[in-house]
Image (cartoon, rainbow, N blue to C red):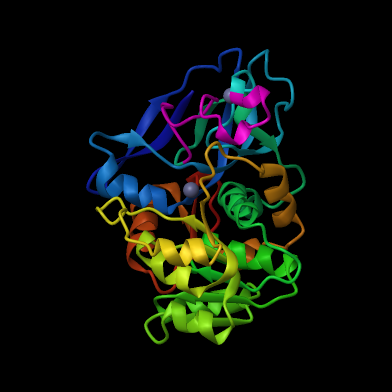
Amino acid sequence: MKVTAAYIQTPFQISLKQVDLPSPGSDQALIEVLACGVCGHDIEIGESLASEPRAFGHEIAGVVREIGENVKHVKVGDQVALESSSFCCDCDLCRNGRVDLCNKGAGFWTGLTMGFSDAMLVPGRCLVPAPDMDVKSVVLAEPCGVAVDMIKTAEIGLTDKVLVVGAGIIGLMGIAIARRLTTGAVVAVNRSKGKLSGAMELGADDAFSSNEISIPEIGARFGGFDKIMITAPPQVIPDCISAAAYGGYIAFIGSDFKGGGVVPIDTHALHFGKKQLRSSFASPAMYFPQALHLLKTGVVPADKIISHTFPLSQIDEAVRVMREDRETVRKVIVIPDSKFKA
Ligand SMILES: [Zn+2]
Ligand SMILES: [Zn+2]
């Protein structure tokens, strides 16, 4: 089967190629792509991680078109979301109930084509049925799973005051879910002001620019936050330790591949404050059924999360908007040209 697929090489050289996809093997399925989201990680790949051209796009909604004989839980014609990596079910970690720690499972990161294409081959294990849902919700399952992992890492309780640091889309989804979990205040902080309206739309009680008020000052204003979810570079961690309440948990998602990963922290503030700093890293990709439910029920509203849609032939423009239009961009999605309606 001939398909069009996008490839990226550092620095941001993007090309479209015609590729011949073979039929799926016995454990695989051929997925027709319906939509694929552009993720911050795609920007990192384009910036520094792709020394040679590679397929990309890992936030995928699709339809099963062909299927290997061992794939039993979905059938041809089913709409699916794709786990970007799965767990194996066979290793000691999996057998001991810690599938969340297993990185031996199937994935599609080395595939001939990935989400920015017309179609791709994927391990059947990665397919999660997503029936009766709008494609724009299904395509958010992967990042929503990331937000769910962060929510679980933070262990948000019924009356917790919650601070969400960073109002990118994981932050926005975190706000929307936290809003349903706690009767306490849900507060957002982001450096640039342009993102604050999104935080308020998704259910924050208050939203601040850290250019105008520091994170420790916000903490003081609310008497300390019981739970803090960080979706911002690691440099904010020291400030978040100060803004946490006695016994507070700080869940952290964030990376800085440009050397900012090492940050000095006040261990006395952590220790004597009985605070916990916890990393949330949604690999393997998990919680898709919960994420799909949150999207289907509108707890996480796709129409407020997706801001831009491009056809695959304009993938370079989709990536450019994601990189440069920081004030207004939320989630950018890409749709194969044959399905794109302007
Ligand atoms: Zn992603
Ligand atoms: Zn395993």
**In this rendering, position of residue 330 left or right of residue 260:** right
Q: Which quarter of the picture shows residue 326? A: bottom left
287, 328: nearer the viewer: 287
- Res 307 visible: no
Q: Residue at x 71, y 34 (%)?
A: 78
Looking at the image, residue 273 lies above or below residue 131: below
Q: Main secondary structure of the magenta part?
A: loop
Q: Where is residue 285 drawn, in percent x and y?
A: 57, 39
Residue 59: give x, y in percent of width and height.
52, 45
Numbered marks: total? 0
Q: Position of residue 91 (x, y in %)?
A: 59, 19
Nearest to the observer: residue 114 or residue 166: 166
Relative to 252, does residue 115 appear above or below in the rendering?
above
| Relative to 326, residue 110 above or below | above
Which segment did they paint magenta? 93-115
The image quadrant of residue 87 is top right
**Residue 38 makes an appearance in the image:** yes
Q: Tell whether position 75 is magenta.
A: no
> Which residue: 68% across, 14% down?
70
Q: Residue at x 25, y 53 (%)?
A: 258
Q: Is residue 100 above or below residue 231?
A: above
